[in-house]
Image (cartoon, rainbow, N blue to C red):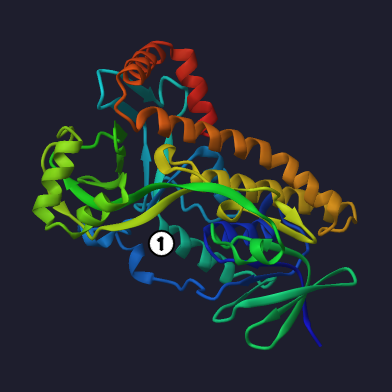
Amino acid sequence: MDKQYDIIIHGAGISGLVLALSLVRGSTSCKVSVLLLDRNMPKLQPQIHESPCSVNDFDNRVFALNEASKKLLENIVVWPGKDNDRIFPYKHMHVWDAGGKGQIHFDALEAGTAFLGYIVEGRVMRDWLVRAVGEEPMIDMRGDVALNQYETVDGGLRLHLSSGDSLTTRLLVAADGAQSPVRQLVGIDAVGWSYHQQAVVAIVETGIHHADTAWQRFLPEGPLAFLPVQQPWCSIVWSVPEQQAEHLCSMPEQEFAEHLMAAFQRRLGRIKVVGPRAKFPLKLLHARRYTANRSALIADAAHTVHPLAGQGLNLGLLDVSALSRRIAEATAKGQDIGGRRVLRAYERSRKGNNYLMQGSFDLLERLFSNDQLVLAYLRNTGLNIVNGLVPVKNAFVREAMG
C-alpha cells in the first residue's frame, strides 16, 4: 500500500525546510503529516557552530534577511537570538553610483528600527532548519530518490519515485528551485531571461571596519556589494558579465584583490585576504501560474530576481508564510488543503506582489548597469534627491523589511 502524507514538499532547501516547520510549529501549525523529498538531502555540519576565526570558516554564500523573515524564523523557533555569533545585523546601507556623484544612505535609527537586516550564511541557516526538522515527529525526510511522475487519484495525487515506490498526498509543493522538476511535471510554464551575468561571491578581510553597513556600488557591468559579517570580514557579491566572472574566479588572489579594491574605490581600505570564490548565473524567471492540480509553487520554483536588492530569499519566505497560513485556515475550517479554493487564495496573495517586486528590481538593474550619459545624470540626480527626503527613504526601508 502507498504511504500517505497530507503534504509532500519537493525540495529541502531553505524555503522547503521552513515551510515544513511552519506547518507543524508556531502560529500556522496544523495537524498534518509532511514529507520532505529531495535527491540531495542536506546533512548536519556541527563544525559551523563554532565562532569563525578565519576567512575559511564562513560559507561564501550569504543571505540578507529582513525583519519579516526573522519573525517567521522566530515563529518556528529556529532563530537563535541576537547574540548568536553567526548572525550579523547591520544598521546602515550605503549605495552610490560609479557614473557620477549620486548616493543614498539608509539608517536604522532614522527609520525607527534597531536593524535594517541580518546577514546569515546559507549553510548555517540550513543547519538550524535540518536540526529542527529532525525534532519533529510529523515531518519525514527522504533523500537519494527522484520524483518521476504522478497521477490523480481520489482526493489526492500518487507520486511515482525512481526507487519504484509510490506515495500519495493531498498537496504537492514545489520548493525545488528555478529549474523546478515539479513545475515542469505539472505543466506550469515560466517566462524570463538571462541577465548574461554571474554573481561572484567570496568572503574577504578588509583593512577598515565595515561599520555595520551594507555597501553597494553600481558599476556599468553590474552592482558590487560588500555585506558585513564578523569584523574584519565582509561577504562580497559582484555581478559581472559571464566571461568576466570566469576570469575573476581564476585570477591569483592578490590580482583579484587589486581588481576588487579598484571597483570598490577602496572604501574599506586594503583587501588583505580573499577566501574561496564561487559564481552562479543570474536570471529572471516568473511562473505563469503558482498552482496546478493539487500542486503549488513557492520561492525560486515560482520566481527568481536579480540579487542587487538582496530580496530573493525574503520573497520566497513570504510565499512560505502565505501558503502555510492558507493551509492552517483550511485545516481549521475542515476544507480540502489541496483544493482549488485554497490554492487560488495563496496565488492571489503572492503573485501580484512578487511580479511588482521583480519588475522593480529588473528596472533598477537596467537603469544602473549601463554608462549612458542621460541615464547616468537622471539616476544620480534621483539618488541625491531621495537621499534628502527622509520620509521617502523610510518608506523604502519599511517595504524592504517586509
Q: Using residue 63 as the reference point, say whether residue 177 is left or right of it.
A: right
Identify which residue, 47 or 367, lies in the foreground: 367
- Residue 102: x percent and y percent? 30, 18
Q: Using residue 125 as the reference point, say whether residue 298 is left or right of it.
A: right
Callout 1: helix, strand or loop? helix
- Residue 65: x percent and y percent? 47, 44
How many marks the image carries: the answer is: 1
Instruction: Name the residue type under label 1.
Output: Arg
Res. 12 image quadrant: bottom right
Above/below status of 346 relative to 400? below
Above/below status of 30 relative to 310? below
Res. 385 image quadrant: top left
Quarter the C terminus occupies: top right
At 71% across and 61% down in the image, what residue appears? 187
At 32% across and 15% down in the image, what residue appears? 377
Res. 213 image quadrant: top left
At 38% across and 71% down in the image, what residue appears? 46
- The residue that mark 1 highlights is 123
Identify which residue, 226 or 198, lies in the foreground: 198
At 48% across and 41% down in the image, what residue appears? 311
Identify which residue, 325 or 384, lies in the foreground: 384
Residue 192 seen anywhere in this rendered image of the structure:
yes
Q: Using residue 238 as the reference point, say whether residue 322 is left or right of it.
A: right
- Residue 19: x percent and y percent? 63, 57
